[in-house]
Image (cartoon, rainbow, N blue to C red):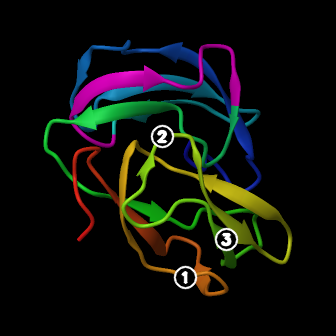
Amino acid sequence: MPSLGASVTEGTVTRWLKQVGEKVEAGEPLVEVSTDKVDTEIEAPVSGVVQQIIVGEDETAKVGATLAVLTSEQTQKTNVVMPSLGASVTEGTVTRWLKQVGEKVEAGEPLVEVSTDKVDTEIEAPVSGVVQQIIVGEDETAKVGATLAVIGPPDSSPQ
């Protein structure tokens, strides 16, 4: 769920434009979302196939939540980034990794615990795969948008 405005914290899925098993092109509208401020279409971030829909129609998700899982046509690595955890929050501290390098993780599964001056929360894996690299260690601080870890394809080995 992307940030759709400074004060928007969640959105409701109104309609999936693609279903599980369907191909989608990068930039193609994937899902319609409604917030208290705007109704919009969210585009597919990569070309691939819809593997799983996590947030169904008429369900609400927080900004940063995983809405669906796409399998990319290209086998690629995915960066796990520090999400925005509040309008005035600019950084967070990794308090505990719940998965280690070489371990498998499922999309939507808690991956890392993060603490800010406003909130303590778990960040979920954006895709299913294998943890390839942990970039920000426990007790280290990262800015919003910084890469915390890298997840590779499910059949990959750590680098």
- Determine whether, in the image, residue 104 is placed left or right of residue 62: left
In the figure, is residue 121 to the left or right of 158? right
Q: Earlier in the sequence, mark 1 or mark 3?
A: 3
Q: Residues within 10 Å of mark 2 (few under 14, many from 20)?
A: some
The Cα atoms of the two marked residues, 2 and 3, are separated by: 18 Å
Magenta includes 53?
Answer: yes
Q: CA distance from mark 1 to mark 2?
A: 21 Å
| Residue at x 41% of width, y 32% of height | 69
Labelled disc at residue 107: 2
Residue 147, above or below 29: below
Amino acid bearing label 2: Ala
Residue sitting farthest toward the bottom: 140
* Neighbourhood count class around disc 1 (C-alpha, 10 Å): few under 14, some 14–19, many 20 upward: some
Residue drawn at 29 percent across, 14 percent down: 21
Q: Amino acid at mark 1?
A: Gly
Residue segment shown in magenta: 45-60
Query: Eyeballing the image, is 54 above or below 17?
Result: below
Say which element carries label 3. strand
The tag on residue 96 is 3
> Which structural element holds mark 2?
loop
Q: Amino acid at mark 3?
A: Arg
Q: Earlier in the sequence, mark 1 or mark 2?
A: 2
Q: Quadrant of the C terminus?
A: bottom left
Please state the horizontal and vertical placement of residue 18, each as a whole percent of the image: 36, 15
* Image quadrant in which the N terminus is located: top right
Mark 1 touching mark 2, by CB under 8 A? no
Q: Nearer the viewer, residue 77 or 11?
A: 77
Residue tagged 1: 137
Q: Residue at x 33, y 43 (%)?
A: 45
Crowdedness near tag 3: few (<14), some (14–19) or many (≥20) residues, C-alpha within 10 Å = some
